[in-house]
Image: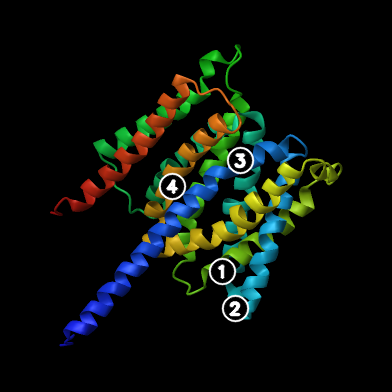
Amino acid sequence: MIHYNHNEFCALEVKVVSVKNLVYGAFALLGLIWGTNFIFMKWATALISPGQVVLLRILFGFVPLVLFALARRSLKWAHLRDLHHFVAMALLATAVYYFAFAKGTALLPSSIAGMLSGAIPLFSFVTAFAFLRQEPINRRTLMGLALGFGGVLLIARPWSAGEAGINTQGVLYMIAGSLSVGSSFVYARLFLVNKNISPVALATYQTGLALLMVFLVTDLHGIERILDDKVALTGLVFGLGLTGTGLAFILYYFIVQQLGAVRAAGVTYIPPVVAMLIGSLLAHEALLPASVAAMSLISGGVYVLQTGKKQAQAAPRR
């Protein structure tokens, strides 16, 4: 039996509290970063194509990441055995996700695009149930899914497609992006977080491969137009690149390692609110009651989903 004296126990308790505070600090910061991404994408896609935005975003995120990873000696030849997993994450959590969100944001008000990103935990739950077999299906989780996807439907409003409503194609792009990144939480948890590979290395491999993929399929004609607007350029380089990609992926892997796939996906509670406030206050986008109601349904659905999951876990097994 191991015995701890009082001082050792207090030191251990302080360390646990410090790590916990660090995790939730990273959680809040990542939510804030992701929430600001939509206005930066909106400004950039007014000048260059969504594919070009994604290419430059990944480039400016990858350069500091790889320099930091090299300085810390985080990259190892032995990691090449997991190259196929890095390729999958490059597609799910970077290339497809970034392009779908950039395209969707170009077709929608930035606040609406941000609200739709709140559906990510719904897709994370569905994919976790399908592939991890760890998520409970009960009345409460089904109700959460119904509420959340009902909110998405309220934003899309397909019944008003012939009117001056929301661009349905933009909504579909946002759904595709949400499904892609929601799946990535589960993929990372299933194949990568137990590999003893640092978050910095994982983020570097993922963004480097995604940069190569996007470069090979992107038409560079007219990309220099981003230089005409200093605000859009600054938002792309610093907002989407350095923090929205480089820093965000380090935080992302750290949170997944500490909290698990579905709890980490809960970080997406924050971006819809941040995007809504920025779109309304900074971009002067109309804040319609139906949109606020839809965001409430999505957030409420995610909350009911999470509490339903906890309820099932707390139930005694027979």
What's the residue at 66%, 58% (across, down)? 61
Name the one closer to the observer, 14 or 142: 14
Mark found first going from the N terminus, 2 or 4: 2
What's the residue at 40%, 50% (across, down)? 128
Per the image, the residue denoted by label 3 is 101
**Secondary structure type for disc 3:** helix
**Secondary structure type for disc 1:** helix
Residue 55 visible: yes
Pinpoint residue 313: horizontal percent, then vertical percent.
23, 52
Label 1 – label 4 distance at C-alpha: 23 Å
Pinpoint residue 119: horizontal percent, then vertical percent.
46, 38
Quadrant of the rendering where the N terminus is positioned? bottom left
Per the image, the residue denoted by label 2 is 72
Label 3 – label 2 distance at C-alpha: 32 Å
Pinpoint residue 139: horizontal percent, then vertical percent.
25, 36
Is 54 left, or right, of 94 in this rendering? right
* Residue 286 against residue 8 in the figure, above or below: above
Mark found first going from the N terminus, 4 or 3: 3
Outermost residue, right side: 221
Q: Amino acid at mark 2?
A: Arg
- Contact between marks 2 and 4 (CB within 8 A): the answer is no
Q: Amino acid at mark 4?
A: Ser
Name the one closer to the observer, 200 or 281: 281
- Contact between marks 1 and 2 (CB within 8 A): the answer is yes
